[in-house]
């Protein structure tokens, strides 16, 4: 049976360019990029090339890119790095658990509610800022329902108040154009594996001139902003994926975004005819690659298992949960059923056949489960 992978919001398969770059790096002579011998300097050149490629994709200066092990570490580094300025952070209720938990460990947190589609009110965010506030978090787009947040307005309001702002762009990077320097944010976190890079690498963008206390200490790597031996093969793969997306003024990124919107619109159009299925999040002002559906009266595990038997991989429940399908804090904050959801997300290699397989299987899976429940 052919498999149809529709969980790209969790992770995407590496692009061919990324795989080739990783393999080439692994076959190249080994060297510590912090050394001045020929081998070390060759690795340093590769790391710095990747830094420039990631910076170009994200509209930043290369010196603003700090490589990390992924978005989770980047978020933790942002939350921890500002604690010398204060021990209070502002967190919208629909932020990823990596943001919510990192902010809570850094000190006091004010949670800001959202509306029924998962969008935060700018005035409510800014009203939560007080004299103790060191950092305001705002995601570019939600990781479960796709709703795009008013990032530019939050950033502008924080700048007027002299408060730092961190943007979680892990779900948005590689999906929509991002211009970090034009945005004016202080910090921005991304992960490579969600946009077709290798796992185990990400980045924290740090605005030029901003000083942070490093989360990881013990070495002067990344200009003393993140200690630890650089994962040069993964960094090279990240750079290659970013370069593919950014080439020709971001032509591939825009093409993929248009295709992702077309494919996910197919899902939204089709579920209009399914009884007991509702759409969560903003169906229009959303990230192009994901949609979230509510399936009333049926446990999500059963839906996922039914789809999996039909060869379709999707996701349900909290996007932060790996071992259990727990209620989603995002959906709870929106005031909808947090126990019965289905997230469908496309990637760079998703085809019409993948969407067709989902749309063929989903009505039968739901009908069969409802029939069992009626017995």
Image (cartoon, rainbow, N blue to C red):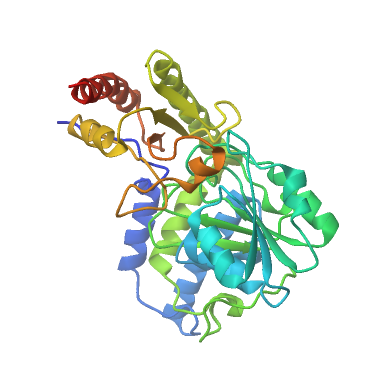
How many discs mark residues in the rendered view?
0
**Residue extending furthest toward the top:** 273
Residue 87: x and y, percent? 68, 72
Residue 45 to residue 116: above or below: below
**Residue extending furthest toward the left:** 1
The residue closer to the viewer here, 136 or 329, is: 329
Q: Is residue 360 left or right of residue 104?
A: left
Residue 247, quarter of picture:
top right
Q: Is residue 50 visible?
A: no
The residue closer to the viewer here, 19 or 87, is: 87
Residue at 80% in and 67% down: 131
Residue 186: x and y, percent? 70, 60
Residue 188: x and y, percent? 62, 57
Residue at 39% in and 65% down: 233
Residue 302: x and y, percent? 24, 35
Quadrant housing the N terminus = top left
Residue 357 to residue 67: above or below: above
Q: Is residue 149 left or right of residue 256?
A: right
Residue 288 to residue 81: above or below: above
Q: Is residue 310 left or right of residue 55?
A: left
The residue closer to the viewer here, 371 or 232, is: 371
Residue at 21% in and 20% down: 371
Residue 317, quarter of picture:
top left
Residue 344 to residue 34: above or below: above
Residue 21, quarter of picture:
bottom left
Quadrant housing the C terminus = top left
**Residue extending furthest toward the front:** 375
Q: Is residue 332 visible?
A: yes
């Amino acid at each position: 049976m052919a498999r149809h992978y529709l969980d790209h919001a969790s992770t995407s398969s590496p692009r061919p360019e990324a795989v080739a770059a990783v393999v080439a790096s692994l076959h190249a002579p080994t060297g510590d990029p912090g050394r001045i011998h020929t081998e070390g300097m060759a690795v340093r050149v590769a790391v710095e090339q990747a830094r420039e490629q990631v910076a170009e994709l994200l509209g930043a200066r290369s010196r603003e890119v700090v490589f990390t092990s992924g978005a989770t570490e980047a978020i933790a580094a942002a939350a921890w790095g500002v604690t010398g300025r204060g021990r209070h952070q502002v967190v919208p209720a629909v932020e990823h658990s990596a943001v919510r938990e990192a902010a809570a460990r850094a000190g006091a947190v004010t949670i800001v509610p959202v509306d029924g589609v998962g969008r935060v009110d700018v005035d409510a965010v800014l009203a939560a800022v007080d004299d103790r506030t060191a950092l305001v978090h705002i995601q570019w787009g939600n990781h479960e329902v796709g709703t795009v947040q008013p990032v530019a307005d939050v950033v502008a309001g924080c700048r007027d108040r002299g408060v730092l702002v961190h943007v979680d762009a892990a779900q948005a990077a590689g999906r929509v154009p991002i211009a970090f320097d034009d945005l004016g944010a202080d910090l921005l976190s991304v992960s490579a594996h969600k946009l077709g890079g290798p796992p185990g690498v990400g980045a924290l963008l740090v605005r030029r001139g901003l000083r942070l206390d490093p989360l990881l200490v013990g070495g002067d790597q990344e200009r003393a902003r993140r200690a630890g031996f650089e994962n040069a093969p993964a960094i090279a793969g990240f750079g290659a994926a970013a370069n593919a997306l950014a080439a020709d003024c971001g032509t591939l990124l825009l093409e993929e975004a248009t295709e992702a919107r077309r494919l996910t619109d197919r899902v939204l159009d089709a579920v209009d005819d399914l009884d007991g299925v509702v759409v969560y999040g903003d169906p229009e002002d959303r990230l192009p690659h994901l949609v979230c559906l509510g399936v009333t009266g049926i446990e999500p595990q059963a839906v996922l298992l039914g789809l999996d038997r039909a060869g379709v991989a999707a996701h349900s429940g909290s996007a932060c949960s790996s071992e259990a399908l727990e209620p989603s804090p995002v959906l709870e904050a929106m005031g909808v059923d947090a126990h019965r959801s289905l997230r469908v997300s496309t990637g760079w290699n998703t085809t019409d056949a993948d969407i067709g397989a989902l749309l063929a299987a989903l009505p039968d899976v739901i009908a069969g489960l409802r029939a069992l429940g009626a017995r």
